[in-house]
Image (cartoon, helix red, strand yellow):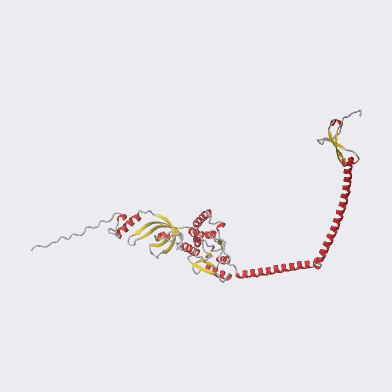
Amino acid sequence: MGTLTSDHHSPAPRRLAARALETTAENPWPVRLLSSKITEYVNRMAPLWVEGQVVQLNRRPGATLAFLTLRDTDADMSLPVSVHARVLAAVEAPLEEGAHVVVHAKPTFWPKRGTLQLQADEVRPVGVGELLARIEHLKRVLAAEGLFDADRRTPLPFLPGTVGLVCGRESKAEHDVVVNARARWPSLRFEIREVAVQGPRAVAEVTAAIAELDADPAVEVIVVARGGGAVEDLLPFSNEALVRAAAACRTPLVSAIGHETDTPLLDLVADYRASTPTDAAKRIVPDVAEQRRGLAQARQRIRHAVRARLHGEEQRLDALRSRPVMADPHAVVERREEEVRRARLAGTRAFAWRTDRAAGELGALVGSLRALSPAATLARGYAVLRTHEGEVVRAPDQVEPGDQLEALLAQGRLVLEVGLDDPSV
């Protein structure tokens, strides 16, 4: 009896893409291959120094490894870090959450969990001195850009309807601002944003709160308030991102950070720097009792001024009424009438005297004229001879015999003819 056999051929293994760009929906990479590729790439990265802030520090007694999260001080980004216990023990000061550090670490990728992690072999806290030096350098940079110039500052409103307040959660700074401001002006409204005012989330949360209040048209002034603390606690308020966000704020901004001796960079870019949260409350609103006293004093001064003016006008009216002209109005007219009469009489006399004198002068001139007039000479029997051309004859040689001459007499004229000059005749 024969044996039945059959050939069973397994499918040929699928050929995977050599590069990520060559993968398709029909020919994808399995997770293990992608994880191995990422592991190879990360393993090629060299160790490096990275700076950040320590959050979520986890140290178990007796464990050889400790775990922490290293968070960026300016952005909401973080990376997990594993560090050997002996490395932490070598740190000069005990490492606490919120500490600013630089870490020397090697990036590693854990394919089973699909996570990227830093393996640290050295941790160095950034000292306060170095942080203050960085702040001083940033201060010079921002000052050179003009962010601290006085002409950039916006005057605070006299009486804002709504005040935006950025403060810690259930903080004393919030109590100081709200209680003191409402004690001065009870109807004042607040838009309060409670945020982290220290630690790794402070910069992002304070910046977001300022932007949110600045976008609210009802908010007329923004107060950023925080109580006093160590230098490290106030570092977020000298952060470049937060300071630039405050400088870009269109709503007038009041900085009330720490005590009077504390001077974070936010104080320099704010429109008004309050020494304490209580001082900020006194600055943003007037004191209603003081304003009422001022109004009462102003009304009193106005009353005194009006009364003094009325009294002065009454005195001037009394002085006018006491003048003689007011007692006898005709006296002025009569006095002027007498003056006009005397002036008219004097004018008449002067005119008559001038006329008589002119008449005498005229008579003398008439006499002289008559004495010198040719007509008077003619009246005494003389005649004036003139040629036909009108020339006066003064000598015989001016005429010839037979010429006709005109003789002007006192009462007419004659026409004469020149005869011969005969001596025998």
Q: Is residue 345 visible?
A: yes
The residue furthest top is: 424
Q: Of residues 184 and 353, which is closer to you in this image?
A: 353
User: Which part of the image, by quadrant, shows the C terminus?
Assistant: top right
Q: Is residue 373 visible?
A: no
Q: Of residues 330 and 273, which is closer to you in this image?
A: 330
Q: How many marks?
A: 0
**Image location of residue 228, percent across then percent down:** 53, 64
112 lies left or right of 167 = left
Q: Of residues 81 and 170, which is closer to you in this image?
A: 170
User: Which part of the image, by quadrant, shows the N terminus?
Assistant: bottom left
**Image location of residue 335, percent across then percent down:** 83, 62
Q: Of residues 101 and 140, which is closer to you in this image?
A: 140
Asked which quadrant contains residue 290, the reply is bottom right
Residue in the image at 43% along x and 63% along y? 55
**Image location of residue 154, percent across then percent down:** 56, 60
Residue in the image at 88% along x and 43% along y? 370
Residue in the image at 83% along x and 60% along y? 340
The residue furthest front is: 425
414 lies left or right of 270 = right
